[in-house]
Image: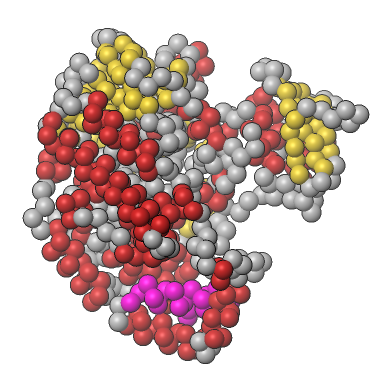
Amino acid sequence: MRGRVLRHAAMAMVAVAAPAAGALAQADPSSASTRAAHAAAVAEMAGRSDEDRDFASRGYLGTLADPVIRTDAGTVVWDFRRFAFLDQSQAADTVNPSLWRHAQLLAKHGLFRVTDRIYQVRGFDLANLTVVRGDTGWIVIDTLSCTETARAAMRLVAEKLGDRPISAVILTHSHSDHFAGIGGVLTAEQRAAGTIPVIAPAGFFDEAVSENLVAGPAMNRRAGYQFGLALPIGPTGAVNSGIGPATALGTRSLPRPTREIAQDGTELVIDGVRLRFQLTPGTEAPAEMNIAFPDWNVIDLAENANVTQHNILTPRGAKVRDTRLWVAGLTQAIERNPDATVMITSHGWPRFGRDRIRDFLTKQRDAYAFLHDQTVRLMNAGLTADAIAAQLKLPDALAREWYNRPYYGSISFNARAIYQFYLGWYDANPAHLAARSPIDAGRRYVSAMGGTAKVMSLAQAAYGTGDYAWAAELLNHVVMGEGAPADARALLARCYDQLAWQSENALWRNMYLSAAADLRGPAATRPSTSQSGLVNGLSLAQAVDLMAIRLDPAKARDLAITLKATDTDEVVSVRVENGVLIAGKPSPGRSYVTVAAPRAELLSMLLAPSKANPAGNDGPDAVRSLREMLDKPSPSFAIVVPPPSGG
């Protein structure tokens, strides 16, 4: 089971870099080059359909009176007032006008009537929560990122539509912004009893646990950049996350489905409602499914269709997605639902009208097909990933549609992802076989160009002409190779500011501004979200996998332990030798220390050392010895400056 872990991970505390107070205030105002780029964006936007404003507002029933959502301890999880700056019609001069429009639409929050049986709570989190009126209760589709926002969403549903029991919960896919808020929909007792169906696609639980075990700490740090978790929300900070307003940071849980849909085309009748499931594994998520309501001509495309171009490879890091499977899944959705008159999705707003839905699905499908086919064509003609990314453009018939704009995914990133899917990172040029470290390369480039002062002069000149990307490339060599001098960091941060102001892509904007904040430093850390509910979902074997990838060979010494969960009958034997931690059957002739306790206590023992160990034998000493061999990953490791070790 090596190589499996939980997204958002099993660290007891995750932290992200936070800018020093007032750091973003050091940014330059929007430059002449940036204002010119914005004017060009406005000109390009002219004449496009604005039906999205109707779709995003249609059926509005109201929102919560209290604009702040808090944890039970009073910590703020969500504050609708943070997005009030988007109320002004004209874009701020520090935000791309196209992104501003998109952010305005996604910031609309409240309960919306989609049909007389289907409602959505939107704008409470990164994703949507959908409720379907059954004969006796609510069928809830997707449960947001955390308990607090999901609980608030269900409270709003009760306020506007009346109290009804939960008939079932359906989780469309294995990403945590769609399942980790289950605690706000079902109580712990209801989940433990398993009497209320929790339905998910085949492989959901394993994929929800597995996607990020090996790379969890790195993914979390990179996700902090991608979603701008350390940035203030506002015209000079994060304005949007591309597929939703922002990510809520609250209490998360990992649900175990009572049923996984294993057969494509499965039909169920739940509380009087007929549902047909289309399995789409390997598309936007490893385990995902669309849902049709054939009696109502309604389809739910989960996250396979979106109000933006999506990611073939997410910047936070993950396995590359299979574009061909994604295209095939959308083609099947079109062919299987020719009479659909309403379409909902897990992010963004619905679409109404048979022709509009078909046109939307066809053109979004074709955009992914074009990216795939043309990337592969150019790849087979000998172009590298970077060369393809620099020249590939969608045809105007596809590019002009708002839902194909690069608010979340981008042509540049997706072209390189498709190349990587087939050929990996190596471009076949032997000059890149043994690449130098960023520090060594930076030092050599700076020396070759005449020294730090010369490179700074070149970068300043590029900045002055609005060539911010080239200036950033030059300055990155100085920062990495010359010990991150303050003047180079400051100018590089200013370059990233302008690139952020120009960016139509919300994630690129967040990453540029997160980098600028880190460059201005000093960086601090702050806790993000409670992961205890996710950690408690780990099996013993998964917990051991988590420990194996943290083993420091310099600290490792031979050790053998058998872990027994007295309440679940899980047994895992662990041995450390040759600088690796291996789980398997006990080795003949080897003496193992046995540690027995309920699974939750064993997980606390292994992953939360502050907890007292319940075992009465020599187990605690053995477990303590094992923990002492483990690294504690840094939650805020250096990205845009050299690491303290100089590695």
Q: How many marks?
A: 0
Q: Is residue 481 left or right of residue 170?
A: right
Horizontal relation, residue 394 to residue 560: left or right: left
Residue 485 falls within the magenta-colored stretch: yes
The quadrant holding residue 306 is top left
x, y percentage for residue 101?
A: 19, 53
At x 62% / y 28%, what residue is drawn? Answer: 539
Q: Residue at x 54, y 86 (%)?
A: 448
Q: Would you place residue 385 above or below residue 359 in this image?
A: below
Q: Is residue 153 magenta?
A: no
Quarter of the rendering occupied by the C terminus: bottom right
Q: Is residue 388 left or right of residue 106?
A: right
| x 46%, y 77%: residue | 475
The foreground one among 97 and 189 is 97
Residue found at the far front of this picture: 381
Q: Is residue 102 above or below residue 520?
A: above
Give percent across and percent down for residue 412. Answer: 35, 59
**Residue farthest to the left?**
47
Q: In the depicted view, which residue is nearer to us: 33 or 618? A: 33
Residue 331: image location, x then y, percent? 27, 34
Image point 67% across, 24% down: which residue?
599
In the rendered image, which quarter is residue 156 located in?
A: top left
**What's drawn in magenta, residue-wise?**
467-490
User: Where 123 sits versus 141, above or below?
Assistant: below
